[in-house]
Image (cartoon, helix red, strand yellow):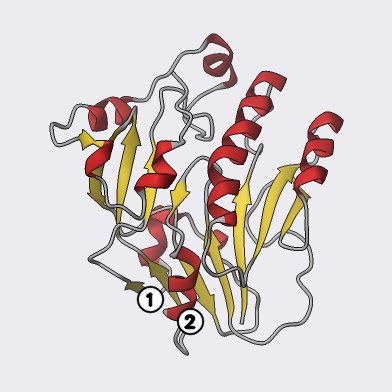
């Protein structure tokens, strides 16, 4: 089995230096911390970066790279960046955004759930997180999904948008009784394509979907979250 964690950093739109520095700190605080905390380290992380990434940021990335973490130049990301060499089937790929959170057992449980069939694996339950409050949500077609490929064609979880994976192959729900991830909501969610560069530079947001979610009445204090995810949530830097 070859298990790859696939992430993206500065794709979609031209990014200002201030945005890139903010995103770098978010990645170090959230994404990188989650990867290091995994109880199973039998996986490799590939982070897709734009070919026009500035020199100073490439130097920062080079300080983070090791045999488990690699940064790859791309224009758009629709598949695994670069060559992955020879390996024994299956190929397992997992999506993960740089500003979100997974529990320490996440990758171990993905691998434990692999069977001899080509399919998507998803943990349907997680949290929304915003300003030290959390809300439990059920969201099967989430951005933390994995894809198990036995075809030998090196197909990855990135071939389809996570919101439509149920239309593109078999999907199996795993650990339906546990919260395995946290989706961080902040006032300037800088990874989403719904905002233009003008919005970003002016500090504006047009996220009607965010406002709707924050108006739900069933948000609870962080202290009520399950103990395995609470330590990861505590250190979140929330952009206000």
Question: Viewer-proximal residue, 87 or 120?
Answer: 87
- Residue depicted at 48% across the width and 72% down the height: 108
Bin the neighbour count of mark 1 within 10 Å (Cα to Cα): few under 14, some 14-19, many 20 and up: few
Residue 123 lies, in percent from the top left, at 35, 63
Please tell me whether residue 95 is drawn above or below residue 112 in the rendered image: above
Marked residue nearer the N-terminal end (1 or 2)? 2
Residue 173 percent coordinates (x, y): 31, 70
Give the distance between the C-alpha atoms of the residues marked 1 and 2, in whole angstroms. Answer: 8 Å
Labelled pair 1, 2 in contact (Cβ < 8 Å): yes
Q: Which mark is residue 149?
A: none
- Look at the picture and state if 220 lies above or below 97: above
Residue 49 drawn above or below residue 236: below
Q: As rendered, which of 228 and 69 lies closer to the eye? A: 228
Q: Which mark is residue 118?
A: 2
Q: Is residue 134 visible?
A: no
Please report the residue visible at 63 percent of the width from the left and 23 percent of the height from the top.
Answer: 19
Q: Say what secondary structure mark 1 lies in.
A: loop
The residue pinned by badge 1 equals 170
């Amino acid at each position: 089995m070859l298990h790859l964690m696939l992430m993206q950093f500065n794709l979609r739109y031209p990014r200002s230096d201030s945005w890139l520095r903010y995103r770098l700190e978010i990645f170090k605080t959230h994404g990188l911390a989650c990867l290091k905390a995994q109880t199973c380290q039998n996986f490799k992380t590939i982070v897709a970066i734009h070919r026009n990434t500035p020199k100073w940021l490439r130097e920062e990335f080079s300080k983070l790279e090791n045999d488990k973490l690699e940064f790859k130049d791309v224009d758009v990301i629709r598949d695994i960046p670069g060559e992955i060499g020879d390996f024994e089937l299956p190929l397992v790929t997992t999506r993960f955004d740089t500003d979100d959170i997974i529990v320490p057992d996440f990758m171990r449980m993905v691998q434990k759930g692999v069977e001899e069939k080509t399919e998507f694996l998803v943990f349907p339950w997680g949290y929304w997180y915003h300003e030290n409050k959390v809300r439990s949500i059920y969201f099967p077609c989430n951005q933390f999904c994995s894809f198990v490929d036995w075809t030998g064609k090196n197909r990855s979880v990135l071939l389809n948008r996570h919101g439509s994976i149920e239309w593109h192959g078999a999907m199996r729900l795993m650990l339906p009784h546990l919260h395995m991830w946290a989706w961080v909501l902040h006032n300037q969610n800088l990874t989403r394509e719904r905002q233009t560069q003008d919005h970003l530079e002016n500090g504006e947001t047009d996220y009607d979907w965010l406002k709707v979610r924050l108006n739900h009445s069933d948000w609870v204090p962080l202290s009520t979250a399950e103990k395995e995810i609470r330590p990861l949530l505590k250190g979140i830097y929330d952009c206000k």
